[in-house]
Image (cartoon, grey):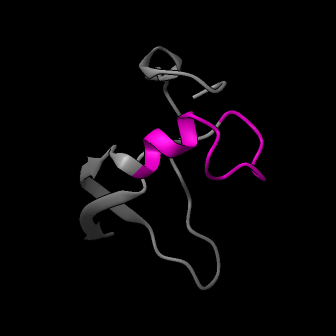
Amino acid sequence: MTRQGGPEVMEFVERPEPVSGPGQVLVEIAAAGVNFMDIGVRHGLAWTERLDPKILGVEGAGRVV
């Protein structure tokens, strides 16, 4: 999302392939949830200390690669 608002502030964008650093793992996401927490973020009720753009989808399932 690039700003606060309704579903219209969400957009699909291509991102560079992530690279894990020291002490980190890389997870290949098989499923992600965009849910109640993300609604709060879009409406400015959570993650207010983080600057836009924000990546929504705080829940995910996958495998460590």
Q: 9 left or right of 45?
A: left
Q: Is residue 59 above or below residue 52?
A: below
Tell which of 22 and 9 is nearer to you.
Answer: 9
Q: Residue at x 78, y 53 (%)?
A: 49
Q: Position of residue 61 (x, y in %)?
A: 24, 63
Q: Where residue 24 appears, x then y in whole percent?
A: 55, 78
Q: Is residue 29 left or right of residue 53?
A: left
Q: Is 2 within the magenta?
A: no
Extreme-bottom residue of the structure = 23
Prevailing secondary structure of the magenta residues: loop
Please give left or right for residue 64 compared with residue 31 in the image.
Answer: right
Q: Is residue 2 left or right of residue 12?
A: right
Q: Nearer the viewer, residue 34 or 14?
A: 34
Location of residue 39 with respect to 61 vertically, above or below: above
Q: Residue furthest top?
A: 8
Which quarter of the picture shows residue 38?
top left
Q: Measuring from the top left, give residue 36's x and y in whole percent.
A: 36, 48
Q: Quadrant of the N terminus?
A: top right
Q: Position of residue 64 (x, y in %)?
A: 32, 73
Picture mark count: 0
- Establish if 48 lies above or below 43: below
Q: Which residues are magenta?
A: 37-53
Location of residue 19 by image quarter: bottom right
Residue 39 is covered by the magenta coloring: yes
